[in-house]
Amino acid sequence: MNVKAAEKKQRWAVVDSTAIGVDKKYEPPLIIAWGVDSHAVGTQTITMGRTIIPPRGRNQRHYHVCDATFYIAKGPLVVWMGEEKEEHTVQTGNFVYAAAGEIHGLFNPSETEDAELVFTYGNCPNRDAARTIYVEEAWQEEDKRDHIPG
């Protein structure tokens, strides 16, 4: 089942991340598929999505007004946490947690392979409610792909 929009909260849904639209402007050069949120399934308590980080791709460091988590589905990724930019190399299979207000950012060190993560925003119904606040200016162009790879 592909889910495009929800007028009311659904009791359940299966959302195909390879079939829904992608967001390339939110954190260039990352490719994001917003899979579970108030727009897709009507939830008011969680946002979940899938992100592709192209080779040598890096996002702007930022924070949210809600807790954020991500699971490294394909790595490694270099993750920076806190104002002091504490660096961690996070391998495939690991979870990362950033409390509301905690600055974080990431980088794919591979020269040839995409990295991938699945993220959630807790107690936030959608991207806009998470209020992503950037602490760095954008410097990378958006990726040219128009879908999440299968």
Image (cartoon, rainbow, N blue to C red):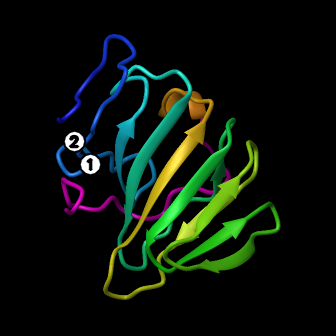
Query: Residue 22 placed where, x, y %?
Result: 27, 46
Extreme residue in the right direction: 84
Residue 143 belongs to the span the image colors magenta: yes
Which of the pair 108/11 is nearer the observer?
11
Which of the pair 94/78 is nearer the observer?
94
Q: Is residue 122 left or right of residue 31?
A: right
Extreme residue in the front direction: 11
- Indicate the amino acid at tag 2: Ile
| Residue sitting at x 56%, y 68% | 106
Q: Quadrant of residue 130?
A: top right
Residue denoted by label 2: 20
Specify start and end residues of the magenta stretch as a single range. Answer: 131-150
Q: Is 93 placed above or below 25 here?
A: below
Question: What quarter of the picture does the N terminus occupy?
Answer: top left
Mark pair 1, 2: CA separation: 6 Å
Q: Is 113 placed above or below 74 here?
A: below
| Residue sitting at x 82%, y 68% | 84
Residue denoted by label 1: 17
Query: Residue 3 placed where, x, y %?
Result: 23, 31
Secondary structure of the residue carrying numbered label 1: loop
Q: Is residue 26 left or right of residue 148?
A: right
Secondary structure of the residue carrying numbered label 2: loop
- Packing grade of label 1 (10 A; few <14, some 14-19, many >=20) is many
Q: Is residue 117 left or right of residue 89?
A: left
Per the picture, the main secondary structure of the magenta-coloured stretch is loop
Question: What quarter of the picture does the C terminus occupy?
Answer: bottom left
Query: Residue 140 placed where, x, y %?
Result: 42, 65
Q: Is 132 placed above or below 147 here?
A: above
| Residue sitting at x 23%, y 42% | 21
Q: Are marks 1 and 2 in contact (CB under 8 Å)?
A: yes
